[in-house]
Every structure is written in C-alpha cells, then in structure tokens.
Image: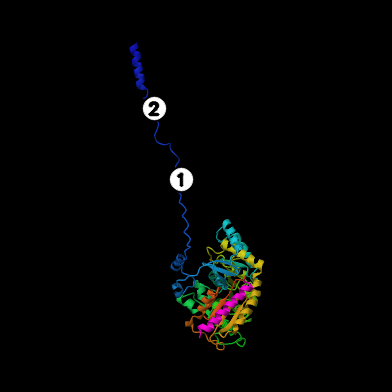
C-alpha cells in the first residue's frame, strides 16, 4: 500500500510542469520612453562687421552697386551711410551731411521716422506676409487702395501693386496693350515715349528710355517703341524757341501716330516733369493738355510716369495736377513709402479695369507679383501718408520750394551757371562754358563729378549728371538747411570758376 502511494506521488510529480527558477533581479536599467529626435540647433547670427577695413573689403568684393560704372567699381573708398534724421544723414565716422537728393528722389518724409518703423513692426508681428493673390487680401493692402483712391486724379480708382517704379511702368504697358485688344484693336502694341526720358531698368521699361547709352547694351528690346522729342525748352532738340515753336514737340507725337497708323499704337508714356537727364525740364503750360487731346483723338492711352514726381515732390500730390490733366494709367513708387520699404503701384481708370475685374468683366489679365502689395510695405505707405497729412508736407514742398528756388536763382550771377530750373522741391543747375551759346564744357574735364565730391567733402549730398547738378531734398528740409545748401553750392561754384577751368 505504501509502495503504491509513493509510486502515485512520483507519477504526479512527473505530470506537473517543472517550476521555473526564481527570476534574478535584472542589472539593466528600466526601459525609458523613446527619445525625441534631435532638433536642429539655431545657428549663431553672422558676426556684425565693425572693423572699417573689413567692411570696405566686404562692400568692394561682394556687392555690385546699383548704376556703378567701371571706374566706380574699381575705387577702393566706399562710403557708408549708417543713420539719419530729417534731411541729415551720418556716415560711419559720424560726419553729417544734408542729403539734398533724398536718397534717390525717394525719402520725402525724411529719415528716422519712428512712426513708419513702428507701423511696419506692428504689421510684421501680426502678419508678416501673405500674398495679394486672386481673392486674398491683407488689411493693409485694402486700406492703402482706398487711401490712394482719394489722392489720385478722379477716375483712377484701381491699383495694381508691385515692388518698384520699373515694375509699375511695365504693368501700365501691359494693361494698355491688353485693353486695346478688348476694344477690338489686336494690332495696337506700339508705344510712344520721349527722348531723354527715364522709365526704369527692367527690359520693358528700359525699352522706353530715351537715352541710347541705357538701351543699346541690352538690345534687342521691346518691339514697337517709338521716341518723340522731349519738351525741353532750354535745350530744344528741334532748335526752336517757345512760344514761337507752337509746341512742335507735341505735334511730333501726332506725326508719329499717323505715320505708324493709329490702329497700331497702344499708348504714350511720359514723365510730367522730366528726370535728371534733362535737369527736371518743366514743359510749357499748354504741352500736357495738347498731348491729352492728341491721345484722345486717336484712341491712344496716356500713361503718366509719376514715380519721380509723385507724393508732394512738385508741390502737388501728383505733378499732373499742375496742368489739370488726368492720364488713363499712372505709375508711382519712391515717395509712396518714402523709401522705408519697397512698393510700387499702377493706378488704372475704372473704365479700363472693369474690362478685367468685377461682375461685368469679359477678359483675362494674367499678371501678378509675389511681393506686390506686401502687407508690411503697405503699412509703411499708410504711415507715410499719415505723416503727409499731419505735417502738411505737400504744401510745405510748395512753400519751401519757392523759397529755395529764389535762393538758387541768385547763383545765376556766376558766368558758368547757364540755367536754374525746377518745380516744387525739384531743382537743377546747368553749367555752361558760354552763357550766350550754351556751349558745354568738355566731358573729359569731369567737372560735375568733381563738383559732387567737393560738395560731399563740405557736408552736402547732390547728384551730378553730364553738365548738371540736381537737387531734390526731403520735404522736411528746414530753411536753415536750405540756406546752408546754397552757401555750399556758392562756395564750390566759386572754386570751379577760379581753379578748375582756368
């Protein structure tokens, strides 16, 4: 019996699963959650160059400046402007200069306007960028469009925003040609510009420029551009004198239209007051109205390039107001933001725009810019226009411009000063070898470049062009600064006459 019991116990033990040995404590660390993937470390900002020699090297070796000629690129003395306030700028050594050319005919409201900087800062914190694309708008682009509609001549109610004046001009060309197509004139593609004009440097705008030196290196350019005589009475290319000329320069526009055939001419483009190449030639009072009549007679659209003259520069918001002439399209930039951020705009008559946008639109206009109507740039423009209203800058340009022009006219006493001309806060002094014949100085003397550099050394920034010195100071210029400008010019003219041309 006992043996049977023992046998059963042994059999039962065999049938049970073997007991696992007790698990030893693991020496491995407890399992941790998966680590996050490594994040890219922010790169340290590039060190700011403070050593003047290093800064000069960086500028000379790595920057191709705008409009620099071969000798300009070879020079080893770049100038650094580091700050500014009002009409005064400072260089890296702390020397101050009256900027009598407003950057490049741009800084209407002056330097250091924190109101504009603050407006841009707030906009960029809220929404730095979103494109004005199809049916997307920023608040600032809508507000700016509405604001501009109250400033431009009546009827120019639509605005296409771009980045600068060249683009604004090209937009106007495209709108004009496309509009003519909608009117049943598919062959109207030609454009009339004027000799000695300046409309920009992009290929389309460059085609319009009336200076061979600008166009020739980049030819072939836009086909169909024809050039009429400039309205430049001091140096009339037709050899005539106003008023006996009976506006021959305007009549030449009609001659070109008829010669080319009116059903091939899309538009005429002009600067109401011509640019630096002519020393801001102001046309006779009948000229712009006559051009308007000619364009209307032949169905040619009239484009005004107010990039240089817009926003108070001539003592009116836009120069065309002096002659009570309204164009069909108008290009603007520069003073729109006073240079605080890039922005251009093309104003279009509502009757033209309605062909392409709105419920009654019948045609496409395929065009756009990534940064056209940039929210921050529009914020800068609005703040800039607020300053115009608050400080009466356009009226100031008229009043101070009259004062400065009277002071500059005193320089006519010098035998080398052939003419002093301008309007509002646009001025030019033309130098001649002989006042009666208007004979020019030999170009190899380089007088105007030397003149500009002597002004710089005396604390004044001006622009030189051929036989001209051009002035277009910020509209916030003071009377004391105006007097100082004239005093420096007087000193340098005397030096020119006594030392440079003996």
Image position, residue 313 (x, y; %) = 61, 73
Q: CA distance from mark 2 to mark 1?
A: 36 Å
Image position, residue 468 (x, y; %) = 54, 80
Q: Nearer the viewer, residue 365 or 489?
A: 489
Q: Quadrant of residue 294?
A: bottom right
Q: Is residue 37 above or below residue 482?
A: above
Name the residue tied to disc 2: 22
- Magenta residues, start to end: 477-502
Q: Is residue 502 above or below residue 122?
A: below
Q: Quadrant of residue 423?
A: bottom right
> Would residue 279 be seen by someone viewing this image from the given angle?
no
Look at the image and say whether residue 356 sits in the magenta stretch: no
Q: Is residue 84 above or below residue 23?
A: below
Q: Helix, strand or loop at disc 1?
A: loop
CB under 8 Å between callouts 2 and 1?
Answer: no
Name the residue tied to disc 1: 36
Query: In the shown orientation, is residue 95 left or right of residue 154?
Result: left
Image position, residue 172 (x, y; %) = 56, 71
Query: In the shown orientation, is residue 7 left or right of residue 36?
Result: left
């Amino acid at each position: 019996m006992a043996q049977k019991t023992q046998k059963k116990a042994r059999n039962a033990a065999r049938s049970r699963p073997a007991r696992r040995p007790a698990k030893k404590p693991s020496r491995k660390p407890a399992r941790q959650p998966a680590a996050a993937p490594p994040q890219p470390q922010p790169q340290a900002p590039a060190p700011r160059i403070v050593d003047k020699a290093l800064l000069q090297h960086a500028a000379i070796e790595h920057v191709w400046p705008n409009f620099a000629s071969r000798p300009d690129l070879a020079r080893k003395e770049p100038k650094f402007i580091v700050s500014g306030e009002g009409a005064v700028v400072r260089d890296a050594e702390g020397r101050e200069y009256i900027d009598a050319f407003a950057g490049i005919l741009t800084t209407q409201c002056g330097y250091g306007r924190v109101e504009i900087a603050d407006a841009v800062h707030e906009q960029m914190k809220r929404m730095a960028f979103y494109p004005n694309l199809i049916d997307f708008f920023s608040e600032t682009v809508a507000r700016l469009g509405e604001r501009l509609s109250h400033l431009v001549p009546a009827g120019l109610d639509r605005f296409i925003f771009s980045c600068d004046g060249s683009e604004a001009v090209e937009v106007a060309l495209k709108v004009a040609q496309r509009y003519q197509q909608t009117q049943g004139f598919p062959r109207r593609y030609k454009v009339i510009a004027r000799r000695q004009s300046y409309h920009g440097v992009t290929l389309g705008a460059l085609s319009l420029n009336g200076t061979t030196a600008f166009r020739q290196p980049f030819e072939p350019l836009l086909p169909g551009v024809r050039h009429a005589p400039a309205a430049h009475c001091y140096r009339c290319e037709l050899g005539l004198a106003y008023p006996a000329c009976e506006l021959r320069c305007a009549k030449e526009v009609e001659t070109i239209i008829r010669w080319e055939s009116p059903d091939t001419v899309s538009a005429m483009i002009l600067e109401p007051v011509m640019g630096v190449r002519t020393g801001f030639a102001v046309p006779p009072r009948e000229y712009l109205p006559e051009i308007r009549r000619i364009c209307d007679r032949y169905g040619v659209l009239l484009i005004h390039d107010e990039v240089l003259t817009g926003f108070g520069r001539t003592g009116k918001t836009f120069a065309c107001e002096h002659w009570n002439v309204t164009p069909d399209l108008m290009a603007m930039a520069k003073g729109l933001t006073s240079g605080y951020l890039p922005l251009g705009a093309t104003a279009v008559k509502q009757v033209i725009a309605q062909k392409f946008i709105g419920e009654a639109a019948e045609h496409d206009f395929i065009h756009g810019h990534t940064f056209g109507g940039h929210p921050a740039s529009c914020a800068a423009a609005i703040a800039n226009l607020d300053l115009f209203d608050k400080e009466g800058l356009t009226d100031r340009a008229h009043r101070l411009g009259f004062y400065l022009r009277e002071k500059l006219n005193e320089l006519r006493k010098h035998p080398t000063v052939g003419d002093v001309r301008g309007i509002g806060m646009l001025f030019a002094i033309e130098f001649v070898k002989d006042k009666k014949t208007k004979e020019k100085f030999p170009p190899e003397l380089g007088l105007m470049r030397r003149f500009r550099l002597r002004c710089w050394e005396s604390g004044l920034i001006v622009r030189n062009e051929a036989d001209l010195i051009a002035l277009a100071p910020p509209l916030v210029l003071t009377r004391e600064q105006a007097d100082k400008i004239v005093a420096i010019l007087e000193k340098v003219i005397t030096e020119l006459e006594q030392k440079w041309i003996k």
